[in-house]
Image: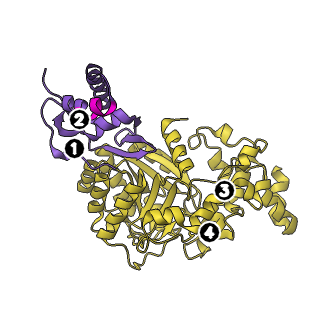
Chain colours: A yellow, B purple
Amino acid sequence: MSLLAEMSQKAFDLGVPISVHLDVTYRCNERCVHCYLDHEDHGEMTTAEIKDVLDQLAEAGVFFLTFSGGEVLLRRDFFELLEYSRRLLFNVKVKTNAVMIRETEAQRIRALGVDTIQISVYSHRAEVHDAITKLPGSFHRTINAIRFLQQQGLKVTVANVLMTWNRHDSDGLQRLCAELGAHYTLDPTITPMMDGNTSVLSLRIPGEELPQVFRNPALVPNMEEFCAPPKPVTDDDLEGYSCSAGHSFCYISPYGDVYPCVQFPLPSGNIRRQKFLDIWNHSPELNEVRSIKARDLTVCSSCSHVSRCTRCPGLAYMEGSMRGPSSADCEKSYYRTGIPSANMLRNAGSASLIQIQPLAVHA
Amino acid sequence: MPDTYIARSSNIAARMLAGEMMVMNSMDSTFFTLNEVATAIWQAADGRTPLRDIVSSRVCEQFDIDPEQAQADAAQFVADLAQHGILLVSDHPLGDSAVTEER
């Protein structure tokens, strides 16, 4: 285990919020087809409020801080907030679409000692990227920004969300990233909108196409292990937790709402009304999330995938229960290993034959 | 022998966790943890106080360590951190810009 992994585990065990994702705005200059946010401003925190939050996060032991949105650079005070956070010695990652980053902004980001810039890019073809963002010219502006940031020696990660619109462009974008010197990541997860609207889920690529992602050694270096059938479940596995949400990580919205994770819209308190540490230590919602071990999961505790599943408790919550299965992750486990999940088998027993057809082919 | 002055690099992130200071260099993502003595030196790295004085006031007095040994260990520690871009080292006082707040 690396030293960093050791310290992250220590934070998890001690219940220290070592990592926080802070959205400073939901406003955005792009209108991505798969986005889960409401871009209207319903009363963002002020500069002073966010600085106070940053002070509180530093006191609480937060080390890794992600600034995201919306588009962070739509806030006129963004560099002021960035500078303030670096004075407090956070390790800062910025998520942005980068269309507002030119040479000057890249220099400022570099001077402030930001660790990583994560940039959303959806294709190596301008027409596909711009169709997804609905902002003409966004591809060229974003790619130019990556060049400016790279020239400053900054670490740039390109985040590609794989969906029906760009399903054939992953390899091309990966090659472009290699040319640019940017790290490439790919995620096939499409999340329901924060208000529960699931219409965007129609953009998910068909499950049958997931193996092309999971079995691509350029994307998954430890592919053999990653796609191996699950090992027998042990007692230790059942004592484990799903992820760091609520344990050593949480999410804060532009309105001061605290949630276990970006993908886990369980309101757990608001820092305009309570101190962050009061929420972190005493929120009944966060304490409930923390209490859930694998053995407490209603269906997944009996699933052979339970120890290695990417089960997202937030997606499960949006599906009906934070203790229940997340169907999208069931599908990933199945297409990763060829072994159906307990949830899939349960549904196959009560639903139409169309749903069990793939199981008959692969099982 | 000229005095040595040390300051924290502007590229680093740092935070205490369970008595250990975590330090990370944003340029190359190298990650360290500092023990109590190293943390005391690092916290006092204001760019203005000579390392010799930091060691005698923050290390020898507080940790009851032999002064000669402490000075030698501190010089090695500072050289290691400087090599990884965590500390800036100079034979004259350094400006405020390199020094940041730490919790």
Between B67 and A58, the one nearer to me in the picture: B67
Q: What distance separates the C-alpha of mark 1 from that of mark 3?
A: 43 Å
Q: Amino acid at mark 1?
A: Ala
Q: Which mark is residue A311?
A: 3
Instruction: Read off the magenta span.
Output: B57-63
Q: What distance separates the C-alpha of mark 4 from that of mark 2?
A: 51 Å
Contact (Cβ within 8 Å) of mark 1 with mark 2: yes
Query: What subunit carries mark 3?
Result: A
Q: Are marks 4 and 2 on the same chain?
A: no
Q: Nearer the viewer, mark 1 or mark 4?
A: 1
Q: Picture coordinates of residue A320 (x, y %)?
A: 69, 71
Question: Label 2, on which residue?
Answer: B88
Question: Label 4, on which residue?
Answer: A201
Q: What distance separates the C-alpha of mark 1 from that of mark 2?
A: 8 Å
Q: Is residue A99 left or right of residue A291?
A: left
Question: Label 1, on which residue?
Answer: B98
Contact (Cβ within 8 Å) of mark 4 with mark 2: no
